[in-house]
Image (tube, grey):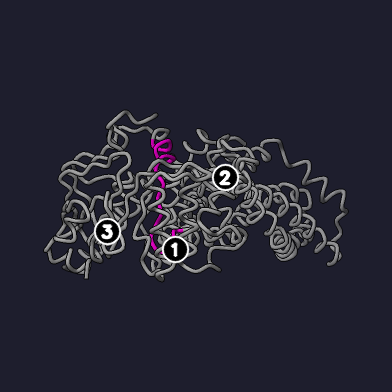
């Protein structure tokens, strides 16, 4: 299954996303195209995680249309869903939701071993490459609980990259990080988006949710925000800088 | 509302809860069954080590406890029963009583309840914690079927563990029962004691024992996994889910046991 020219990766139209405590989030029309870098901001409790999980096809919409790689989510068979999941990496917030009973290396290898398509040599080589890219090469044997939150999140990134996805979704990747680690993430995602060469295939289509727009204000990126139960499209970085919306001002302050 | 009115409201609520629980657990069991058969050979390098881990946890590690329990039951109940039957001259029925009490009823139930207590509760807590911490969504995000990865190994592992533990428990109960009789100078020869038991156990007992213990394991695994996994749960509710899982597993196992009692009566 490959993308035809101009075909959307994700499309949400007239969509209603269920949030906790019976609230909902409305998305009139949002499309993710190959090669795009979306930065979606929102303050606490605006539904960033739910929106991102819906965009990644992990959560169905309550109403409206939700298409993944051109096919409505409801029409996908179980096998097609699994095939789609391999094309879409997801990095969860905070500790990356690693599996505590597995070591870091086992966590990272799990999706590839489960798909059972790689021999031992390929597995080792791919593992070494993603661990190297994520800067955690020497931490493979450690249990996740012995690592800091920032390192656990890097392991979560390595686990998302091991299947060489075409799209990467990241839920507030910079939250709680010191400036050094935050710069590492920003630089790596910039290189992914620029299509720089890595030992493995890396995604150049990226969607991140953020609480602070400032580190992400780079040309060539699309910005949106979640406010009052709606997804509001903001445009490019230059427009965001000039925007006088109260929430945008909060996220630029 | 009057006292009687409140009582009927309580009964109605309880009936509705039982109906919903049976329906939800039944649906979860069917999903598990479907995944077990359709994906049995898939992802062996991940799933089979998990099955081995569950067998080690629910079977091998419980073997000493099973032998201890078998010895206690053998000494306390079977030994005294053998002693009593011999004293009243009913030595000829020892084999039949042992087959009915130990092989059909006591062995499978004792093994199932032991596994439920040691592993079933831990399963609810483990899976409930995973669910509460979002690890189930993480599996889905990686293209891993949570039922295949988390439930199937537990169902297979618990089913085979309870079957194996039951066999060891029955052997221990029979041997320790004789040991008690020997130590208390009950005049019964080993060849009479063991010979009667062997004579009274038929191929049907082996088949029913296997089916019953495999079903006990399946029920315990499905009910505990359902309470840990199948519904949204918060960390503070995990202990309540464990309580529900234990009580429902016990009830389900006893109901299944009743079905087998009827089957024994009908087929004998």
Where are the magenta residues, as a range? A81-97
State whether residue B126 is above or below residue B160: below
Residue indicated by mark 2: A126
Which of pointers 1 and 2 indicates the residue nearer the eye? 2
In the rendered structure, the residue with mark 1 lies on which chain?
A: A
Which mark sits nearer the N-terminus, 1 or 2? 1
Q: Are marks 3 and 1 on the same chain?
A: yes
Residue that badge 1 annotates = A95
The chain carrying label 3 is A
- In the depicted view, which residue is nearer to us: B164 or B155? B155
B246 horizontally vs A230: left or right: right
Residue at x 43% of width, y 52% of height: B138
> Which one is earlier in the sequence, the residue at label 3 or at label 2?
2
Q: Which callout, 3 or 1, points at the residue further toward the start of the chain?
A: 1
Residue at horizontal 47 percent and vertical 48 percent from the top: A161
Proximity of marks 1 and 2: CB atoms separated by less than 8 Å: no
Location of the N terminus of chain B by quadrant is: bottom left
Chain letter of mark 2 equals: A
> Are there few (<14), some (14-19), or many (20+) residues within 10 Å of tag 2?
many
Which residue occupies 49% across, 69% down? A148
The secondary structure type at the circle numbered 2 is: helix
Reply yes or no: does residue A90 show up in magenta. yes
Q: In this orientation, does residue B80 appear?
A: no
* Of marks 3 and 2, the one in the foreground: 3
Please name whichever residue, B91 or B195, is drawn nearer the observer in this view of the structure: B195
Residue A217: mark in rendering: 3
């Amino acid at each position: 299954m490959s993308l035809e020219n101009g075909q959307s990766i994700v499309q949400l139209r007239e969509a209603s996303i269920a949030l906790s405590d019976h609230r909902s989030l409305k998305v009139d029309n949002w499309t993710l195209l190959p090669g795009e870098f979306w930065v979606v901001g929102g303050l606490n409790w605006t539904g960033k995680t739910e929106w991102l999980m819906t965009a990644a096809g992990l959560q169905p919409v309550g109403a409206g249309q939700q298409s993944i790689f051109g096919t409505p989510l409801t029409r996908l068979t179980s096998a097609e869903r699994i095939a789609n999941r391999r094309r879409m990496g997801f990095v969860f917030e905070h500790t990356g939701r690693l599996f505590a009973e597995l070591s870091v290396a086992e966590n990272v290898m799990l999706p590839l071993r489960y798909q059972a398509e790689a021999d031992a040599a390929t597995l080792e080589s791919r593992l070494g490459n993603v661990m190297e890219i994520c800067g955690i090469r020497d931490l493979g044997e450690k249990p996740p609980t012995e690592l800091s939150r920032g390192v656990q999140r890097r392991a979560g990134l390595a686990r998302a990259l091991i299947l060489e996805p075409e799209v990467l979704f990241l839920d507030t990747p910079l939250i709680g990080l010191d400036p050094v680690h935050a710069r590492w993430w920003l630089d790596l995602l910039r290189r992914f988006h620029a299509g720089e060469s890595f030992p493995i295939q890396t995604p150049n289509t990226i969607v991140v949710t953020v609480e602070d727009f400032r580190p992400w204000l780079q040309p060539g990126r699309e910005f949106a925000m979640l406010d009052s139960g709606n997804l509001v499209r903001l445009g490019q970085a230059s427009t965001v800088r000039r925007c006088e919306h109260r929430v945008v001002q909060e996220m630029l302050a | 509302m009057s006292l009687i009115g409140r009582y009927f409201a309580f009964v109605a609520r309880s009936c509705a809860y039982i109906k919903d629980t049976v329906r939800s657990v039944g649906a979860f069991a069917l999903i598990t069954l479907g995944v077990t058969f359709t994906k049995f050979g898939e992802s062996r390098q991940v799933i089979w080590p998990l099955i081995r881990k569950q067998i080690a946890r629910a079977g091998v590690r419980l073997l000493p406890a099973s032998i201890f329990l078998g010895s206690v039951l053998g000494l306390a109940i079977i030994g005294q029963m053998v002693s009593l039957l011999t004293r009243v001259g009913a030595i000829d029925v020892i084999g039949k009583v042992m087959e009915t009490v130990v092989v059909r009823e006591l062995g499978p139930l004792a093994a199932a309840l032991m596994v439920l207590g040691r592993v079933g509760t831990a399963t609810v807590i483990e899976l409930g914690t995973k669910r509460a911490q979002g690890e189930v969504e993480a599996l889905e995000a990686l293209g891993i079927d949570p039922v295949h990865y988390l439930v199937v190994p537990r169902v297979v592992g618990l089913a085979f563990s309870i079957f194996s533990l039951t066999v060891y428990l029955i052997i221990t109960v029979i041997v320790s029962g004789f040991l008690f009789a020997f130590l208390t100078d009950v005049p019964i020869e080993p060849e009479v004691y063991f010979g009667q038991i062997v004579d009274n156990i038929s191929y049907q007992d082996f088949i029913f024992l296997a089916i019953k213990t495999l079903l006990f394991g399946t029920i315990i695994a499905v009910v505990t996994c359902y309470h840990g996994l199948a519904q949204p749960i918060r960390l503070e509710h995990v202990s309540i889910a464990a309580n529900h899982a234990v009580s429902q597993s016990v009830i389900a196992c006893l109901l299944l046991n009743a079905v087998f009692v009827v089957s024994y009566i009908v087929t004998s």
